[in-house]
Amino acid sequence: MTIRVMICEDQEVVRTGYVTAFDAQPDMAVVGVAADGPAAVEAVTSLKPDVVVMDIHMPLMDGIEVTRRIAGPGVVAPPKVLVVTTFNVDKYVYEALRAGASGFLLKDAPLLELVNGVRTVARGESLLSPTVTRTLIGRFADRLRPAVPTPDEDPLAVLAPREREVLRLIARGLSNAEIAAELVISFETVRTYVSRILTKLDLRDRVQAVVFAHRTGFADDVGRPAEAAQIQEEVKGVRDD
């Protein structure tokens, strides 16, 4: 199956490099490019790509608003959006994720990593580099974590102990393979747990799971050591399905 890719990037040199890299892949085809926000929205609507590689800093309409219009709440059959950003100067990554992006990479990432990132989001998975995730959480901690819910308002009550442990590892930025190694379970079992977590919490993807975990304070081990210890104890006796 060929992945239909669209590139939204205002710098011609970068745009040309992306086109060359993606068209060289046997499983990809670039179906369109856009150099500004309104053109991107129009092209995505007409071309219906599988994956949109989105630069945040776009003329006329930034990549956040473009992402919201093509992949935000209420959009029917949205494409996957992979945001590529210069994180150390970009203050809007969190908003892009909330707008509907499936993940993000730094702009200085090797082209091979970008190509594999497109494949990852095309499969319906989310792309969050552990290092970038930790940086994101550190910079936006005050916005990701409002008040910690009271016990009778626990949004995680629907999750089984093992599912909560998997969510905690997702929030740390671990991949499915790394979670499998950490918990000594199979890769397929991890995928099953992730799917259950997303369904029970009504989350679209792994990116939303990370944001959810930090907004509720669940991933804050330092602030909630008692809960962390309790969950660790609970999962000891849980048999993997």
Image (cartoon, rainbow, N blue to C red):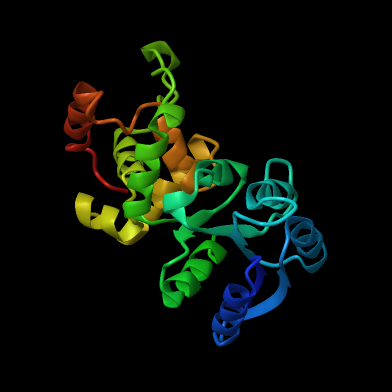
The residue under the point 72% across, 54% down is 77
The residue under the point 46% across, 29% down is 143
Across and down, in percent, residue 45 comes to 80, 60
Position of the N terminus, as image quadrant, is bottom right
Judge left or right: residue 199 versus residue 54.
left
Judge left or right: residue 118 versus residue 79.
left
The residue under the point 27% across, 47% down is 240
Judge left or right: residue 149 versus residue 226.
right
Across and down, in percent, residue 164 comes to 33, 35
Q: Nearer the viewer, residue 192 or 239?
A: 192
Q: Is residue 95 visible?
A: yes
Q: Nearer the viewer, residue 240 or 106?
A: 106
Whether residue 209 is situated above or below residue 85 in the rendered picture = above
Whether residue 218 is situated above or below residue 137 in the rendered picture = above
Across and down, in percent, residue 154 comes to 41, 20
Q: Nearer the viewer, residue 208 or 99?
A: 99
Across and down, in percent, residue 2 comes to 63, 79
Q: Quadrant of residue 42?
A: bottom right
How many numbered marks have been drawn onto this rendered protein structure? 0
Q: Quadrant of residue 229?
A: top left
Whether residue 102 is situated above or below residue 19 in the rendered picture = above
The residue under the point 32% across, 48% down is 241
Q: Is residue 184 visible?
A: no
